Amino acid sequence: VVTLDPDTLEFVREIPGIGPASWSPDGRRIATSDAQALVCVRDARSLAEVARFGEREFLEELRWDPQGRRLAACSKRMV
């Protein structure tokens, strides 16, 4: 996942993860997933890991609830 400056579209940083990614509604966290179906939630500024959990199969989508308190991880067969 690559982040760009919204005004200049210049590269800011690369965030590890090869699957879906989702920014929290307040922009303070970003969730990414990898090929091993691990989900990593990071602080958006420092990229420090704040949570990690695993799923059983490759994830198709990550989505935060509107308040940013819960994260849904969806594959082809589960939510």
Image: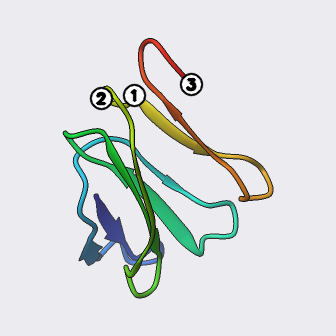
Are the residues flagged by discs 1 and 2 in contact, CB closer than 8 Å?
yes
Q: CA distance from mark 1 to mark 2?
A: 7 Å
The picture places residue 48, in percent across and down from the top left corner, at: 38, 81
Residue located 71% across and 59% down the image: 68
Residue drawn where x is 40% and y is 87% of the image = 46
Which of the 4 image quadrants contains residue 26? bottom right
| Residue 52, image x, y percentages | 41, 59
> Identity of the amino acid at label 2?
Phe
For the residue labelled by badge 1, is the local secondary structure a helix, a strand or a loop?
A: loop
Question: Does residue 41 sit above or below 76 in this rendering?
Answer: below
Residue 37 drawn at (x, y percent): 30, 39
Which mark identifies residue 22? none
Residue at (31% x, 26% y) in the render: 57
How far across and down, in percent of the image, does residue 61 sit? Answer: 46, 33
Q: CA distance from mark 3 to mark 1?
A: 10 Å
Label at residue 60: 1
Q: Vertical placement of 6 versus 73: above or below?
A: below
Dot 2: element: loop
Left or right of residue 37, residue 77 in this image:
right
Number of numbered discs visible in the structure rendering: 3
In the foreground, 20 or 49 = 49
Q: Residue reaching furthest top?
A: 77
- Direction bottom: furthest residue: 46
Residue for badge 3: 79
Q: Going by the image, does 71 lie left or right of 15? A: right
Question: Pointer 2: what residue?
Answer: 58
Residue type beneath disc 3? Val
User: Which numbered disc, 1 or 2, marks the residue closer to the eye?
Assistant: 2
Q: CA distance from mark 2 to mark 3?
A: 12 Å
